[in-house]
Image: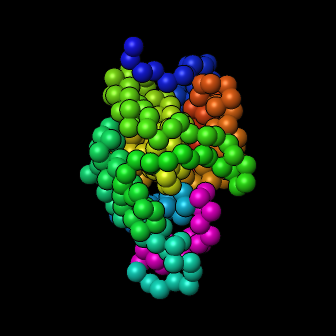
């Protein structure tokens, strides 16, 4: 049987998809170039990187992240500075990456985690779990199953007739469930979600969704755990659609 993620299309998901589509239409009609102006793209890219890394406990401020990307010297942890430099390099590939390609996923992870973990650009070789601080939220499948799980997930995404807003959120959850890398899964999952959405509507390449995820970080982890316990990810899809809707409202 073809692989199918455990997911139910709720009435609330249908409502949220309608709201997001309406907001996308309004944003494109009102000022289609607002998010693609070079200075806006750069500012939003920096906000995205800062927020996504902050979720992973990177303590650098938005101003410090901006300075690092500008090539200025910053006092801070060399590891945290490297995380910013790597993330910027990975996100610079945004328009050249195919979000439906597992090979491009590995390529982007190689940049994102370069010099930070030995297995940068490779699927993990050992066990790994998802933690919220000191609390274990999820224990990932065995490493030997990761390549098959990832291939199945990408194949499902390519074949699925669900709306891109829905199936990209399902992909995000399943990616975090598989946890294919030794480290960097959170930042890669959020990045890939944006790339999948960007392939649907280019506005999402530049929308800093990660900022609102950061503002709802506890809820983000809680709903991941809830989806694991329930055995299906509708609640996670609802949360991601709320975040996307609220990000669009801000612009």
Q: In this view, does 58 lie above or below 166?
A: below
Q: Residue 14: x, y in percent?
A: 55, 22
Q: Nearer the viewer, residue 211 or 128?
A: 128
Q: Residue 234: x, y in percent?
A: 60, 26
Q: Which residue is drawn at 64% across and 31% down?
A: 227
Residue that extends furthest to the right in the rendered view of this protein: 135
Q: Residue at x 52, y 73 (%)?
A: 79
Task: Classify residue 145 by image quadrant.
Answer: top left
Task: Classify residue 133 by image quadrant.
Answer: bottom right
Residue that extends furthest to the top in the rendered view of this protein: 1
Q: Residue at x 73, y 49 (%)?
A: 135
Number of on-image labels: 0
Q: Residue 68 lies in magenta, yes or no?
A: yes
Q: Residue 180: x, y in percent?
A: 46, 44
Q: Residue 101 lies in magenta, yes or no?
A: no
Task: Classify residue 146 by image quadrant.
Answer: top left
Q: Which residue is drawn at 34% across and 23% down?
A: 159
Report the span colored magenta: 54-70
Tell me if 101 is positioned left or right of 173 in this view.
Answer: left
Q: Which of 195 and 114 is in front in this view?
A: 114
Residue 101 in view (yes/no): yes
Q: In which quarter of the image is the N terminus?
A: top left
Residue 247 in view (yes/no): no
Q: Residue 83: x, y in percent?
A: 48, 67
């Amino acid at each position: 049987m073809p692989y199918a993620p455990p997911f139910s299309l709720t009435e609330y998901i249908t409502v949220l998809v309608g709201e997001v589509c309406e907001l996308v239409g309004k944003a494109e009609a009102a000022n289609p170039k607002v998010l693609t102006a070079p200075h806006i793209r750069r500012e939003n890219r920096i906000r995205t990187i800062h927020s996504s890394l902050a979720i992973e406990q990177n303590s650098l401020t938005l101003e410090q992240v901006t300075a690092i990307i500008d090539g200025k010297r910053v006092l801070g942890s060399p590891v945290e500075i490297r995380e910013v430099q790597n993330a910027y390099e990975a996100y610079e590939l945004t328009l050249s990456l195919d979000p439906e390609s597992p090979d491009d996923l590995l390529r982007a992870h190689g940049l994102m985690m370069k010099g930070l973990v030995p297995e940068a650009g490779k699927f993990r070789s050992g066990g790994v779990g998802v933690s919220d601080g000191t609390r274990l939220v999820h224990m990932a499948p065995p490493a030997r199953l990761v390549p098959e799980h990832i291939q199945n997930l990408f194949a499902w995404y390519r074949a699925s007739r669900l709306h891109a807003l829905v199936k990209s959120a399902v992909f995000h959850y399943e990616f975090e469930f598989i946890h294919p890398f030794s480290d960097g899964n959170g930042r890669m999952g959020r990045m890939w979600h944006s790339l999948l959405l960007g392939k649907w509507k280019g506005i999402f390449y530049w929308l800093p969704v990660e900022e609102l995820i950061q503002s709802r970080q506890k809820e983000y982890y809680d709903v991941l755990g809830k989806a694991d316990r329930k055995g299906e990810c509708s609640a996670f899809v609802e949360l991601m659609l709320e975040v996307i809707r609220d990000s669009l409202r801000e612009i």
